[in-house]
Amino acid sequence: MQAEPKKSQAGSLVGQEYEVEIGPVAHGGHCIARTDGGQVLFVRHALPGEKVVARVTEGEEDSRFLRADAVTVLEASKDRVEAPCPYAGPGRCGGCDWQHAKPGAQRRLKGEVVAEQLQRLAGLTPEEAGWDGTVMPAEGDKLPAGQVPQWRTRMQYAVDPDGNAGLRRHRSHDVEPVEHCMIAAPGVSELGIEERDWSGMESVDVIAATGSHDRMVILEPRPGARLPLVELDRPVSVMRVEEHDGGIHRVHGRGFVRERADDRTYRVGSGGFWQVHPMAADTLVKAVMQGLLPRKGDMALDLYCGVGLFAGALADRIGDKGAVLGIESGKRAVEDARHNLAAFDRVRIEQGKVEAILPRTGISEVDLIVLDPPRAGAGKKTVQHLASLKARKIAYVACDPAALARDLAYFRDGGYKVRTLRAFDLFPMTHHVECVAILEPVKKDA
C-alpha cells in the first residue's frame, strides 16, 4: 500500500508495507494481522491492539502467510516501552522477541500462547488443565521495574568476517555485532568476549556456571583456522570444536563446569545441557517434586535425564528402598549423570533413545515418571508406552507449549488427565516459556 513490493523474484512481496491492526499474539514471538486482501501477516516488534506499518520480510503473493516487521507504530499499546537494548528492533538481533513490552505484559502474552496451544492442540481450557493462566517468574527472580534481567548463563556468539562477536539476526545467518548483550549473566559479561578479535572463528560459546565460579569458552574455528591465544582476566576452561569429528576437545582447564541445584552439585561436560536461567533448575525441581510428592520406596523413571537433575532429586526423596532409572541419549551426559549420582546405589542410567531403551528394560509398572523431552516433544509412541506403565503421577517438563499440548492429548487417549499445570518465565525478553504439567490416571467409575 505505502510502498511498491521489491520484485527480486516473481511474486515476491518482500519490502511491501501494509498499514494494519494487530490482532492476538501467536506462538513464536509475533502477532497476527491481515492485509486488506485477507492474507495473514505474522508481525514481529508489535503488540496486540496496535496499529502499525508492517514491512514484509518473507513471502510471496501466493503464500499462505507472510512474515513482517512493525517498522512504524501508529497507535501504541499501553504495554509498549522503548526497547532498552540498542540492538533490538526490525532487522537487528533476533535473540529477544519482547524487548518492547513491559515485563508483566510479556508474561501475559506467554500465558495467552500457552492457553491457545492447549485449546487448539489438546482441547483443554486452563481450568481443565488445573492452571490459573499466569506465567510466574523464576524462583526469586524479582527486579525493579525497567531493569533488564541478566539471566543468560550460556551464550553462543556468532563471529562475522571481520572477527567481531555478535548475535544472529532473526531467521538469518547474518551477524549483528554487539558491544554488550543485556540479558547475559554477569559471569558471561565479565569475560569481555565482545571486545576481542575472534578472526578465524565461526562461533564462541560461553558458559558461566551457577553456584560455582567455573567459566568455559568453546571455540569453533572456521576450516583451516588456527585457534587464538585466549587470555582472560579470570580462570576459564577453553575447549575446541574439532573440524574432523565435530567433537568438543579440551585445550586447557577442566572439561566441565560445576552447577548447583537442589543442594547438590552436578558436573556438566562441555556442550552438555543445563538450564540457562540461573534459578531455573531449582525452580523446576521444586515444581516437579511438589507435583509428584515422592514416597519412600517408590520406583521412578527420569526420561531424557541429561546429567541427572531430576534423578538426583528423586533419589534423595525415595530413600534406599526406592529406585530410579534414567535414560539419556547423549554419551557425555550419561557419563556425567553416572558420576553425579554415584552415591546412590539404586540409581541406574542407561544410554540411548527413550523409545528404544525403555521397551528393552522389561519394566511393566512404575510409581512416578519425569520426562523432560527436547523441543519436539515425546511423541505418540513414547506417550502410549508411558501411559501403559500405570504411574501414580507423571511430571512433564516442557520448553515448547505446542509439543506439550500434542503430548497431553496423547496422554488423555492413554487414560491420563492433567491435574495441575504451572508456567514459568525462565527466558525473559524472549517468547520462550517453560511449563510443568502433573498428570494422574483418570479414575474409572465403579
Image (cartoon, helix red, strand yellow):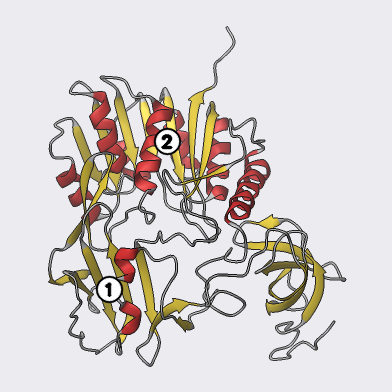
The answer to whether residue 398 is above or below residue 160 is above
- Mark 2 residue type: Ala
Give the CA distance from mark 1 to mark 2. Answer: 33 Å
Counting residues from the start of the chain, the first of labels 1 and 2 encountered is 1
Q: Secondary structure at mark 2?
A: helix
Q: Can you say which quadrant of the picture contains the N terminus?
A: bottom right
Residue corresponding to mark 1: 191
- Residue at the location (54% across, 70% down)? 84
- Answer with the quarter of the image where residue 163 lies: bottom left
- Category of crowding for the residue at label 1, using alpha-carbon neighbours closer than 10 angstroms: few (below 14), some (14–19), many (at least 20): many
Mark 1 secondary-structure assignment: loop
Q: Residue at x 32, y 67 (%)?
A: 188
Toward which corner of the image does residue 16 lie, by quadrant? bottom right
**Along the viewing direction, whichever of 22 and 147 lies nearer the viewer:** 147
Instruction: Give 336 or 19, whichever is nearer the viewer.
Output: 19
Q: Across the whole image, how many numbered discs are drawn on residues?
A: 2
| 294 and 430: which is toward the camera | 430
> From this viewpoint, is residue 28 visible?
yes
Give the position of the C terminus as an image quadrant: top right
Residue 330 position within the rendered picture, expressed as x and y whole percent measured from the top left: 27, 54
Name which residue type carries label 1.
Leu
Q: Give left or right: position of 185 versus 442.
A: left
Q: Residue furthest right?
A: 36
- Image vertical order of residue 145 relative to residue 191, above or below: above
Which label was assigned to residue 287?
A: 2
| Neighbour tally class for label 2: few under 14, some 14-19, many 20 plus, Cα within 10 Å | many
- Which marked residue is nearer to the observer: mark 1 or mark 2? 1
Q: Quadrant of residue 269?
A: bottom left
Whether label 1 touches label 2, CB < 8 Å:
no
Please state the horizontal and vertical placement of residue 95, each as a whole percent of the image. Answer: 50, 69
